[in-house]
Amino acid sequence: MALITFSSTMHKDKTVYAVAGSHKQTILQLAKDNHIPIDFSCGDGECGTCLVKVSSIDKAKSNQYGHMGGPLTDREVKVLKEMGKITQAQIDQMRVDDIPSTEWRLACQMVVRDEDILVEYPSR
């Protein structure tokens, strides 16, 4: 099991257990299930509303970007590039290394892995 800590400047931090290895449970779904108010619109990786910053709490399992979540989806790459959160060089490196090349993720696209992570999200 992984521990996911959700952090926001306007809400108290909340840590929840996540079933790692399900290959289906996204950060957004985990937030919804635990009443954590991450903003989202489409829920399909096309709008960028659910942008979060992810870092590893377990440094032994982390890569240079701080987390081992699954590779970015094609939709996520497109949106993050449009938002200026990822460069073409990072995208190219991710394709070679098969690991995320940015701390920025879309909560509706990032699937939880067996790693303790911190998810920082904006609040209104």
Image: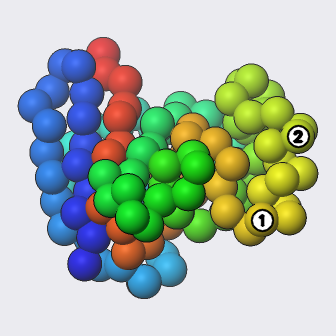
Residue at 88% in and 40% down: 89
- Residue 52 position, x and y percent, is 46, 37
Q: Which residue is mark 2?
A: 89
The residue nearer to you, when weighing 68 against 110, is 68
Q: Which mark is residue 26?
A: none
Q: Position of residue 56 (x, y in %)?
A: 39, 52
Which is nearer the eye, 63 or 46? 63
Q: Secondary structure at mark 2?
A: helix
- Distance of mark 1 from mark 2, alpha carbons? 12 Å
Q: Is residue 97 left or right of residue 17?
A: right
Q: Give the residue at mark 1.
A: 97
Q: Residue at x 25, y 27 (%)?
A: 8
Q: Is residue 92 left or right of residue 56?
A: right
Above or below, 90 against 116 in this view is above
Where in the figure is residue 85, as x and y percent of width and height?
68, 29
* Mark 1, other Cα within 10 Å: few <14 / some 14–19 / many ≥20: few
